[in-house]
Image (cartoon, rainbow, N blue to C red):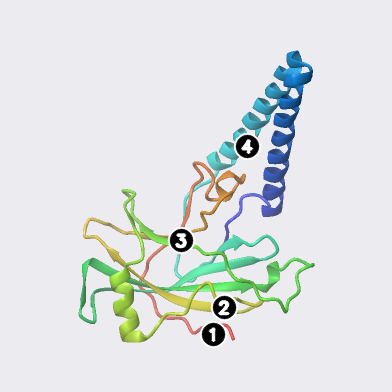
Amino acid sequence: MYRNVNMDAHLAALLFLGAAFLLLMLMLAALVLYFCRRSWVRYSLSAAVVLVIAYGGLLLGFSGFSHDCTLATGKEKYFCELDCHLAYSVQNVERVKKIGDTVANGEFYVVTIRGRFDETTTARWRSRDVPITPNPLRFALIDGQGDVVGVSILGQKAWEATHGASPSLLQPLRPGESIQATMVFDAAPAMHDPRLLASFGVFPTQLLIGDENSLLHKKTYFALERGQMLTLHDAT
């Protein structure tokens, strides 16, 4: 199991909101002082600069102490939804050259991904009868040279034409429920030992201290190992 947090997500969110609010107040104060006591403006601006430097130092400091990690098949990576956590894992990987009549440019990676609402992470104030709609994640293959490959539209259509439509990982889940989806990637011949990265890249995660998407923060990947499909139940 890997929890995708290097510090408490609530604390990171509060630090960001508090810093943003204080910066706004300092800029408003500078604007007022410009018309009232212009000689004092420098104090407000200096405080704003110190605030930005301090926050940026914490952001980069947490990133500097982070490290890359690769999870084996079945191991979970957690994403915070503030009042609960969702866990994602790779359950199965198949590598094929052809799906139906569709031939890969390199090699198709057919990856089965599980999303699970971990009921043990539910906040006290959240009702256990209320489902959550997961935030959308981005999935991509990345190799050691930094080459990135997203989901193959042609490969996905070919797989679904053969096996039926894959469930969506955006399906609402109640505590304890899970869902599985299959994604198809076309890894170019030049890619060697790609890993899967699942990321939640919407603003302001780039500015949250300790978040995986913050500046220079290391990543947690999924290893793409061939494996047997695990028996799981979709959400009801």
Residue type marked 1: His
Label 1–label 4 contact, CB within 8 A: no
On the image, which quarter does residue 139 sit in?
A: bottom left
Q: Earlier in the sequence, mark 3 or mark 4?
A: 4
Helix, strand or loop at disc 1? loop
- State the residue in front, 170 or 196: 170
Of circles 3 and 4, the one toward us is 3
Which mark, residue 58? 4
Which mark, residue 124? none
Instruction: Write the residue at 47% across / 79% down.
Output: 167
Q: CA distance from mark 1 to mark 3?
A: 23 Å
Of circles 1 and 3, the one toward us is 3
- State the residue in front, 78 or 230: 78
Question: Could you say where residue 218 lies in the image, as x and y percent from the top left?
Answer: 49, 47
Mark 2: few/some/many CA within 10 Å (<14, 14-19, 20+): many
Instruction: Write the residue at 70% across / 18% down.
Output: 42
Residue tagged 3: 138
Of circles 3 and 2, the one toward us is 3
Q: Earlier in the sequence, mark 2 or mark 1?
A: 2
Instruction: Write the residue at 69% across / 67% down.
Output: 121
Q: Earlier in the sequence, mark 1 or mark 4?
A: 4
Q: CA distance from mark 2 to mark 4?
A: 35 Å
Question: Could you say where residue 209 lies in the image, as x and y percent from the top left?
Answer: 62, 44
Residue tagged 2: 178
In the orientation shown, which residue stands out farthest toward the front?
Answer: 35
Q: CA distance from mark 3 to mark 2?
A: 18 Å
Label 2–label 1 contact, CB within 8 A: yes
Mark 3: few/some/many CA within 10 Å (<14, 14-19, 20+): few
Helix, strand or loop at disc 4? helix
Residue type marked 2: Ser
